[in-house]
Image: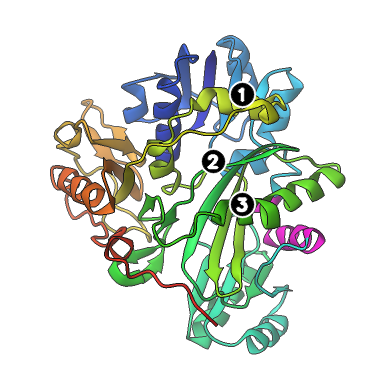
Amino acid sequence: MKILVIGTGGREHAIVRALLADPDVDTVIAAPGNPGIDLVADCRALPGGILDGVGIADLAEEVSADLVVVGPEAPLVAGVADVVRERGIACFGPSQQAAQLEGSKAFAKEVMAQADVPTARAYVCDHEEQLREALDATSAPYVVKDDGLAAGKGVVVTEDLDEAIAHGVGCFGAGASVVVEEYLNGPEFSVFCLTDGVTVVPLTPAQDFKRAHDGGEGPNTGGMGAYSPLPWASDDILDAVVDRIAQPTIDVMLRRGTPFVGVLYVGLALTSQGPRVVEFNARFGDPDIQPVLARLMTPLGSLLLAAAKGELDEVESLAWRSEAAVSVVLAAQGYPGTPRKGDPISGVQDAESDHSYVLHAGTARDQDGALVTSGGRVLSVVALGDDLGSARGRAYDALGRIDVPDAHFRTDIALAAHRGEVSIPTD
């Protein structure tokens, strides 16, 4: 099998790495990829960029790809998967219409209502008066989200009413609506559900960390680290998510004439009433997919192809490593604001071991071929261990071998779970 992966980040590097471990995958091509992916796969340029569906379909034909995997959300919302499928090439990723589950939070809420999915009470606002009324109805802590794509950074959760209003008004100024939601109290977690539009196959849950600094302080980011499994979640949590949330959503999308093929990312809060949806995404999350794929033993390429071809009902039960996995993100100075670019990166090879590896995200080669920073989240270190404590130790040990001037990272990834300090509300 020959697979073309679209994207440039740590998510795509994790996908490529997992695909290369599949004995049925002969070749992985990445477009445009990154310096880390380039060490293990065939990276190709995309002159028209990742939103150019015709250019991506042309490349898929040129390399005789059996499957195209679209990593990021922007090309999915732009309809790249539709163009690829029109060429008769199998594609893992939803259509433009189906990708609106991520592209529009208002649309996602509409689908959730039709599917009777448990989620936060929400208000869609188009101007400041509506915004103030919605904030008054929900009360603090206030949750205000951009309606459209925001790369994981379009939400403000705050006790400060003025901050909530300012974020919403800023969205209006950019021409977007906002969604105001009631705050869901409880630990958040992610479940990635593979689907062919009918059948749903969930992956093991993970938890990621959105705030920039330890203790959940600082601004929201695209994610600063993640871990799996979740020792504080019950054994039947996946059944509950599929039966109550994912399958009804996929059923509604099918009835609407917009079947969802790819991965439905279900972001959840585990409340006293059970799992409640925080958000849907139309692709694998980054970095929370990283520890999940580190633990997956079932060949990934065969899974994604089965989803693309409508054959997930033929897939056997997934196999998982017993070890825990932890991923820690190293971010550039200035992230999540304006990250500094061009800083030298050293020590990546020293961080690699039998138990840990490095995924590239915001990296590039300078004119001399040296590795430098090119984005906010520069690298992720992923480590496996017998338990979360062991995996954490290995991840941070590996991270300590990497040097990026003035870079920063959280020191508390998976710490509360390791200590047994994650609590679920009881009322």
Q: Is residue 298 magenta?
A: no
> Would you call the spot at circle 2 few (<14 residues within 10 Å), some (14-19), or many (20 or more)?
many
Q: Tell me where residue 142 appears, x and y as whole percent.
A: 55, 80
Question: Residue placed farthest to the front in the image?
Answer: 235
| Magenta span of residues | 101-115
Q: What SS does tag 3 mark?
A: helix
Name the foreground residue: 140 vs 187.
Answer: 187
On-image quarter of the C terminus: bottom right
Q: Nearer the viewer, residue 1 or 75?
A: 1
Mark 3–mark 2 distance (CA, rounded to whole Å): 27 Å
Q: In this view, does 239 lie to the left or right of 156?
A: right
Q: What residue is rendered at 50% in x and 75% in y?
A: 157
Question: Residue 144: x percent and y percent?
Answer: 58, 73
- Which secondary structure lies at badge 2? loop
- Nearest the camera: 384 or 327? 384
Q: Residue at x 37, y 51 (%)?
A: 227
Given the image, on which type of amino acid does mark 3 rest? Asp
> Mark 2 — residue?
72
Q: Is residue 331 in view?
A: no
Picture disc at residue 305: 1
Above or below, 50 against 420 in this view is: above
- First of labels 1, 2 by sequence position: 2
Task: Tell me the tag on residue 239.
Answer: 3
Residue 64 visible, this orientation: yes
